[in-house]
Image: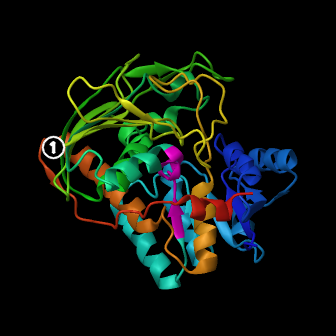
Amino acid sequence: MNKVFKVGLIGCGHIAETYFRAHKYFNNFKIIKCADINNHASKKCAKTYGIKALSVNDLLNDSEVEIILNLTIPKAHYIVAKKSLLNNKHVYSEKPMAINTKDGLELLKLARRKKLYIGNAPDTFLGGGNQKAKELVEKKIIGKINLGNAIFAFPGVQSYHPNPEPWFAKKEGGPVIDMGPYYLTALVNLLGPAKEVSGSLMKGVKKRTIGIGPRKGKKFKVECPTTYLSTIVFENGAIIRLTLSFDVIAHNRNHIELYGNKGSLIVPDPNMFGGSTFTCKKIGEKWKEYKTNKMPLGKINIRTQSARANESPTNANYRGVGLAEMAYCIENKKLNRCNGELSYHVLDIIQSTMKASKTGKKQKIKSTCNKPNYFSQKEIKKILR
């Protein structure tokens, strides 16, 4: 039996529901208390899930809590994670780990000094889709990967989020910070660390309209670029063209395609856990499908149609597996896959992409990380209910 870690949640917003749902999938963590700078939000969360609401400071100082689950807005990730570590608690944060590399590096150093674990979403790369692609890549089914394309393109979160302003704010907004972590983490998981990036950007409409909730119809100002086109060179020599945009109504391209010297591979949506992987090894040959819907973290559990461009109407969502895998690694003194070094490297690529696109100059990626190990079915089953 695994130890069940007691988790304190900070940030009772939109994503919290997903982590409470994770209780029915994973056997080694339990959210027991919550906090939010908005007392109404924390009290509502506590009532909904039958847990105790505290102030943020009281939760950070609570001796019963072992791991802080940091679901605050991006610009607050750093300070909440820092306070968690200073209070001798492991921390698992939503993406990104911080909004700049200076703060991210400070968190890494603090965690090492305190001998505490730091983990970060996204954990979608641990799902059946990306892991099946990883298995095929590492078996060299398509040979040496030389090139690739990846795309996230959508009109923006204002259509489905009642408070979309942070996604369009000056320092914390834009598609690279929002969706970049999913695509970049998936690519690092498949190809290893990156070494260089170049890019260009576009600013879309200056004002957007909230499409849902009590402020529906209200216009707000866009303060950041909303489209980035980048070229990333990885340490293994692969070159990937990545499009991240909040300015596209619809598209029908594959989320990620990798091109090797023995064939091509389609990687499913990195924002989801499931989806089939496809390979083609000869000109004119039909694509071979590798289904993931019978894998533990690939089984379909979503039946509603996504409004995002080219997302599947049915898919798998096991968000929280990164937290469960980290808890298992804490107990067994192993390195967690959603670790600080990986998250910091992805943050470095994000910041370098934004700088390269703004200045028009190539940026060297200063950090590196180890490519995560394949997440075996045997390992997964140890943390499943």
122 magenta-colored: yes
Residue interval drawn in magenta: 118-128
Percent x, y of residue 361 = 11, 46
Percent x, y of residue 377 = 57, 58
The residue located at (65%, 24%) in the rendering is 304
In the displayed structure, 151 sits above or below 331; it is above
124 magenta-colored: yes
Question: Residue 252 or 65: which is nearer the viewer?
Answer: 252
For mark 1, what is the residue?
359
Q: Tell whether 61 sits left or right of 291.
A: right
Q: Tell whether 151 sits left or right of 230.
A: right
The answer to which image quadrant residue 9 occupies is bottom right
Q: Give neighbour class at mark 1: few <14, some 14-19, many 20+ (Cα, 10 Å).
A: few
Question: Residue 276 or 301: which is nearer the viewer?
Answer: 276
In the displayed structure, 156 sits above or below 63; it is above
Residue that extends furthest to the left in the rendered view of this protein: 361
Q: How is the image coloured?
A: rainbow
In the displayed structure, 214 sits above or below 75; it is above
Residue 101 seen from this side: yes
